[in-house]
Amino acid sequence: MNRRNFLRNLTATGLTGGACAALLVGEGEEGETSAEAGLRPPGAVDEEEFLSRCIRCFRCGDACPNRAIVALNEVNGADFSRLPKHGERGTPAIFPRRQACMLCVDVEADELLCTAACPTGALELVKKTSEDIQAKVKMGRARIDTNICYSYNGASCGVCVRACPFEGKALKAGFFERPILNEDWCVGCGLCERACIRYPQAISVEGLEQ
Ligand code: SF4
Ligand code: SF4
């Protein structure tokens, strides 16, 4: 399936829901002083169940063509003193500001590769269809800071809207290309945060547990 067809499929129809988990991490490689969200990969089951199933094999990370998944450790910025009770070393996470999940959009595959690689069901198998992604993927939710977003402050930007795989559904452009979020469609992939040209980012993805 080519990119255009996949994106068309992605925006065709869908349901919302699915499990998600989020971890809190501290200062990252790029020197952020504020906390940023670390998200579980797509298809992650409920966090407690995820930790009981995940054997820290990192097959999901090895399978990711976008190198979006890292194993949590001190080197990649996880601050374990601030993690919620379930956060653990060696488990997989995505930090959208460094590398976001692109939902395997350019990959010839029927399923999201990380979910197909997981041997334990910690990541539920997700087909590369709009319906399955919407039903099973909820990594987090986007948040827009209208106080600093260029499009809400006299300029026209819209970069995040164009980066969204569900453009026109999860993010649509308003006046001056102001991003307008529909949480029902947002799966928390982080491509908007990754694309935002404002620093600190005017749009970011936070985990549902934050
Ligand atoms: S869905 Fe694809 S791009 Fe996203 S984390 Fe999984 S393997 Fe990587
Ligand atoms: S492939 Fe599955 S079991 Fe292995 S680290 Fe990733 S989530 Fe955990």
Image (tube, rainbow, N blue to C red):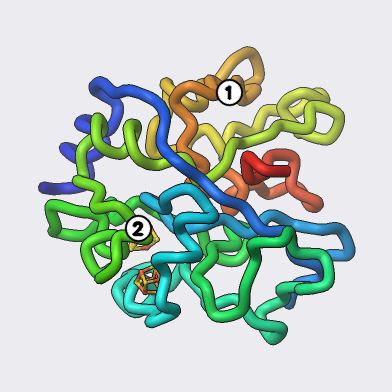
Does residue 110 appear to the left or right of 52 in the view shown? left
Is the CB–ligand 2 distance for label 2 below 8 Å? Answer: yes
Residue pictured at 65% horizontal, 22% vertical: 178
Q: Dot 1 corresponds to which residue?
A: 181
Q: Give the mark toward the camera: 1 or 2.
A: 2
Q: Amino acid at mark 1?
A: Leu
Q: Is residue 108 at least partly visible in the picture?
A: yes
Residue pictured at 37% horizontal, 61% vertical: 122
Q: Quadrant of ligand 1?
A: bottom left
Name which quarter of the figure residue 56 lies in. bottom left
Residue pictured at 81% horizontal, 58% vertical: 35
Name which quarter of the figure residue 140 lies in. top right
Q: Amino acid at mark 2?
A: Leu
Residue pictured at 32% horizontal, 32% vertical: 135
**Label 1–label 2 contact, CB within 8 A:** no
Q: Is residue 82 above or below residue 45?
A: below
Q: Position of residue 113 (x, y in %)?
A: 25, 63
Q: Position of residue 173 (x, y in %)?
A: 55, 21
Does residue 119 appear to the left or right of 88 in the view shown? left
Does residue 177 appear to the left or right of 199 in the view shown? left
Q: Dot 2 corresponds to which residue?
A: 123
